Image (cartoon, coloured by chain):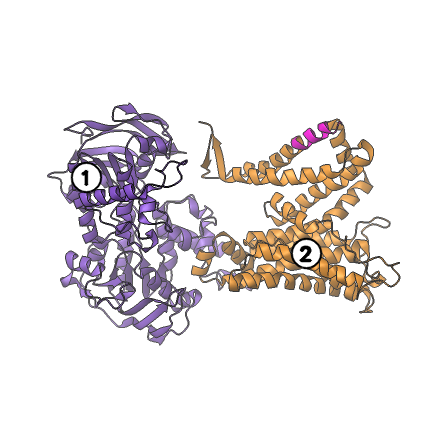
């Protein structure tokens, strides 16, 4: 496959030549060169860890490349200085927003552009300019609202406005749709089209193939730090891009139809109150043997609370919570483990594993109190090590050994460890919260395979995910969660992206809970 | 110049880091010695001679190290679980008060019974003194750094009140001091006629006990897990608050043993100057030992040697013995920097 990394038409606004960056033995970027032309959307496609974010951090001056140079608008860009990148007209919208929650949208936009020595900001002119930009590009926001009160989609618009306000001519968007509903993503794409029509150049970083196909003019594929492929988007197919990204054909997960069995979990109007006594969750849910129930929703709509409830980290304040036919009145994490619930937490770094401890120590974290791992309060490290070794071989964890520090493993291997720990007792009920977030395609396939295997042996799985494609591929039924409430479930034959997308935005939930 | 995270820390770094920290602090101290007009090498020579140069000096150093081992262990246990106990000074006095209260004739028991009772009662007092701030932390989120630090001053004033009132020695010529403890309450000397007492061996034994708890028991495992990542520990089913209470009881008890051992091993009574900051020095010791209980013994002996040696040196060389404070303090600062290099490496570019 030839790498066609050169922009075809128009003027070149950005040129990267031979960018390399190593982190220890890891080649994060290996001799990457490409051009960006005025008026194009260039998609940078690659799996997690392929080096996309590193490359953009070099471009934006957060990192200094070990080798290579960057030219913006014909002039060399000094390395290691974000201010220089800003001055050169490069704007970046990070995956995790960099906004001050306690300031208004307008204050965030002008932040850093005012002179340090002027007494007052020229708010009027700034507001007029922001309104103009908003009208031109379909980026409507209320500039007087505090960022804390804005929705995620609005915050992203503020980020883009911030870049435009600084006269960005090149806009970099890092995984911009990760937090958006399908409809919000559509609106973002419309904005991007308007921007390139005005002559901006856009780099769109993503690992979602559909989006790359929908929005980009040209696509470059990164794999293990190298630029492996490049082509015009027109005429490309999903399967083709996936293969370019992974380096081999990617099979879709196969879900064999099977009948659901007895009820394992039932929530009847189970309410969880938040810090201010407001209900954060008000859920009805039923889960049976041998089925995967998907939970779709925009992040922050109560998925985490539901996961915490089932993990035994928060208490229900009302409603009937039944698990394996028994009423759960007060729950704690140890109790949930004892009941035989397998729990895959959303954040494997902060919650799933204790990064500074060894694999062995992590693997016994839920079982160290009982034999064979401890007797009379003394830990049997031999038994613990054997258990860890079993998990390492059984789940194909790539690591130096059970003594290795968990923090040093890749995300995929960490997730395999957690899977191994949780599946060790053949749980009848599995809670999988964002189990594939941030994993490369190989590891994603492995996680899916394990969940399907559990389903095949009759376990019930609650799959919480922000990746709609994943839910559509694996679930027998899908609920949508919006502001803490669950929709009725859609059976597999009624799955439709537009319908689920509208529900994710609140349609069909009434507005009794609307803020 | 940039810092890059280490993928793996070779064991040589773990050994080299504290040694390098001590070396740098010696160099910095040498500059001060030069400034005061003395020759650094002869001054350091005198410090070493004064610390370990004779049998007398060596025993004196070990005597001085004894309370530091207890308070160092207290800090090491607490810090490992991320319970920031800055109140070892208060807990030390808590133990000392119990020793003075029960050991001055209130319990007329033979030594083999009385001494263990005093040690245990003292430890309980210290444990309770740390339990309060810990419960305030787990229940209400009150910062234990503030509460334990302020408790030091409260307890010191309370001891001052006791020594002017209820515990005042009627035969003490008006000095604020307690009565002498009875003979049966004394910790035996290890060698006839020397000041070194059984407390030193008890301290070393406690270091072994803490090491055993840390590495072999589920309690030590829980404390480590909670210290490294309390959220993950809670998710795995550990009762984080209960673990914190265990840590508090152990840490407070250890610190209190320093007070008991000073009263019944060395001083014989309770005074307001019983501790010249052993509680705070314990933090330095624990950091120098990188929180390892056996390392605490070594670090305590190092810190004690600095103080004992500097005292001897100042009598001969005329350099103020404050130099010991400077050296220990800079050793702490350089140690913090050295710890950084166990996790990061320096890259020039």
Horizontal side of A346 relative to A470 (left or right) equals right
Highlighted range, magenta: B28-38
Horizontal side of A467 relative to B192 (left or right) equals left
Q: Which residue is mark 1?
A: A195
A256 vs B20: above or below = below
Q: Quadrant of residue B250?
A: bottom right
Q: Secondary structure at mark 1?
A: helix
Place of residue B258 in the rendered image (x, y in percent of width and height, measured from the top left):
71, 55
The quarter in which the N terminus of chain A is drawn is top left
Residues packed near mark 1 inside 10 Å, few (<14), some (14 to 19) or many (20 plus): many
Gap between marks 1 and 2, in whole Å?
Answer: 65 Å
Q: Secondary structure at mark 2?
A: helix
| Front residue of B322 and B131 | B322
The magenta stretch spans residue B240: no
For the residues tagged 1 and 2, is the chain the same?
no
Q: For the residues labelled 1 and 2, say whether their Cβ atoms are less than 8 Å apart.
A: no
Secondary structure mostly seen in magenta is: helix
The magenta stretch spans residue B36: yes
Chain drawn in orange: B
Q: Quadrant of residue A303?
A: bottom left
């Amino acid at each position: 496959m030839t790498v066609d990394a050169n922009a075809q038409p128009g003027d070149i606004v950005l040129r990267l030549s031979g960018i390399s960056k190593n982190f220890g033995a890891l080649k994060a970027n290996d001799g990457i060169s490409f051009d960006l032309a005025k008026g194009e959307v260039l998609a940078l496609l690659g799996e997690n860890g392929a080096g996309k974010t590193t490359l953009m951090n070099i471009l934006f001056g957060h990192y200094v490349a070990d080798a290579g140079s960057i030219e913006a608008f014909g002039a060399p860009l000094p390395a290691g200085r974000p201010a220089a990148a800003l001055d050169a007209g490069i704007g970046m919208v990070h995956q995790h927003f960099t906004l001050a929650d306690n300031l208004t949208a307008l204050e965030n936009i002008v932040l850093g552009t005012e002179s340090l020595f002027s007494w007052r900001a020229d708010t009027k002119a700034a507001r007029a300019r922001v309104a103009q930009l908003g009208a031109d590009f379909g980026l409507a926001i209320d500039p007087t609202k505090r960022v804390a009160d804005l929705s995620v989609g609005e915050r992203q618009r503020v980020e883009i406005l911030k870049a435009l306000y600084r006269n960005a001519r090149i806009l970099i968007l890092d995984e911009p749709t990760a937090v958006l509903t399908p409809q919000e993503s559509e609106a973002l794409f419309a904005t991007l089209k308007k921007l390139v029509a005005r002559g901006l150049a856009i780099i769109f970083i993503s690992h979602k193939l559909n989006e790359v196909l929908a929005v980009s003019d040209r696509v470059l594929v990164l794999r293990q730090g190298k630029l492996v492929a490049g082509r015009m988007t027109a005429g490309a197919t999903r399967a083709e891009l996936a293969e370019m990204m992974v380096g081999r054909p990617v099979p879709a997960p196969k879900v064999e139809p099977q009948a659901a069995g007895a009820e394992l979990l039932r929530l009847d109007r189970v309410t969880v109150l938040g810090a201010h006594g407001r209900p954060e969750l008000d859920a009805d849910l039923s889960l049976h043997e041998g089925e995967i129930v998907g939970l779709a929703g925009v992040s922050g709509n109560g998925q985490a609370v539901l996961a915490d409830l089932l993990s035994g980290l928060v208490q229900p304040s009302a409603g009937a919570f039944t698990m394996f036919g028994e009423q759960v009145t007060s729950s704690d994490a140890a109790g949930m483990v004892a009941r035989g619930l397998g729990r895959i937490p959303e954040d494997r770094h902060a919650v799933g594993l204790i990064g500074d401890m060894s694999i062995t120590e992590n693997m016994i974290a839920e079982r160290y109190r009982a034999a064979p791992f401890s007797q009379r309060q003394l830990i049997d490290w031999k038994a613990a090590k054997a258990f860890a070794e079993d998990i390492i071989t059984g789940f194909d964890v790539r690591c130096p050994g059970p003594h290795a520090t968990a923090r040093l493993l890749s995300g995929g291997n960490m997730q395999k460890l957690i899977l191994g720990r949780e599946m060790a007792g053949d749980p009848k009920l599995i809670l999988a919260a964002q189990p594939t977030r941030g994993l490369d395609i190989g590891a994603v396939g492995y996680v899916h395979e394990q969940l399907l295997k559990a389903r095949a042996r009759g376990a019930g799985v609650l799959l919480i995910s922000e990746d709609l494609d994943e839910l559509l591929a694996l679930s027998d039924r899908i609920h949508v969660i919006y502001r803490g409430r669950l929709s009725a479930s859609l059976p597999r034959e009624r799955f439709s992206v537009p319908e689920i997308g509208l529900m994710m935005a609140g349609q069909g939930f009434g507005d009794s809970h609307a803020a | 110049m940039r810092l890059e995270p280490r993928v793996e820390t070779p064991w040589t770094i773990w050994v080299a880091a504290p040694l390098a920290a001590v070396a740098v602090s010696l160099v910095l101290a040498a500059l001060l010695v030069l400034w005061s007009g003395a020759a650094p090498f002869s001054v350091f020579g005198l410090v070493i001679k004064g610390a370990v140069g004779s049998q007398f000096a060596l025993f004196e150093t070990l005597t001085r190290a004894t309370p530091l081992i207890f308070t160092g262990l207290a800090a090491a246990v607490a810090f490992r679980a991320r319970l920031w106990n800055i109140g070892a000074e208060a807990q030390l006095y808590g133990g000392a008060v119990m020793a003075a209260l029960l050991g001055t004739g209130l319990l007329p028991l033979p030594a083999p019974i009385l001494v263990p009772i005093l040690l245990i009662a003292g430890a309980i007092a210290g444990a309770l003194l740390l339990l309060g701030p810990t419960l305030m932390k787990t229940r209400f989120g009150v910062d234990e750094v503030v509460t334990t630090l302020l408790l030091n001053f409260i307890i010191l004033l309370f001891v001052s009140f006791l020594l002017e009132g209820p515990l005042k020695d009627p035969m003490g010529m008006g000095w604020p001091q307690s009565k002498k403890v009875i003979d049966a309450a004394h910790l035996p000397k290890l060698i006839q006629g020397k000041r070194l007492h059984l407390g030193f061996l008890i301290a070393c034994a406690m270091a072994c006990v803490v090491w055993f708890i840390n590495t072999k028991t589920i309690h030590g495992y829980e404390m480590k897990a909670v210290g490294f990542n309390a959220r993950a520990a809670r998710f795995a089913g550990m009762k984080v608050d209960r673990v914190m209470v265990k840590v508090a009881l152990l840490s407070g008890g250890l610190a209190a043993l320093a007070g008991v051992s000073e009263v019944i091993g060395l001083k014989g009574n309770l005074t307001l100057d019983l501790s010249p900051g052993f509680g705070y020095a314990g933090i330095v010791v624990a950091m120098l030992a990188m929180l390892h209980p056996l390392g605490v013994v070594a670090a305590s002996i190092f810190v004690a040697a600095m103080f004992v040696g500097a005292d001897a040196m100042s009598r001969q060389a005329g350099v103020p013995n404050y130099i010991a404070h400077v050296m220990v303090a800079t050793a702490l600062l350089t140690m913090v920097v050295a710890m950084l290099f166990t996790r990061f490496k320096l890259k020039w570019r």
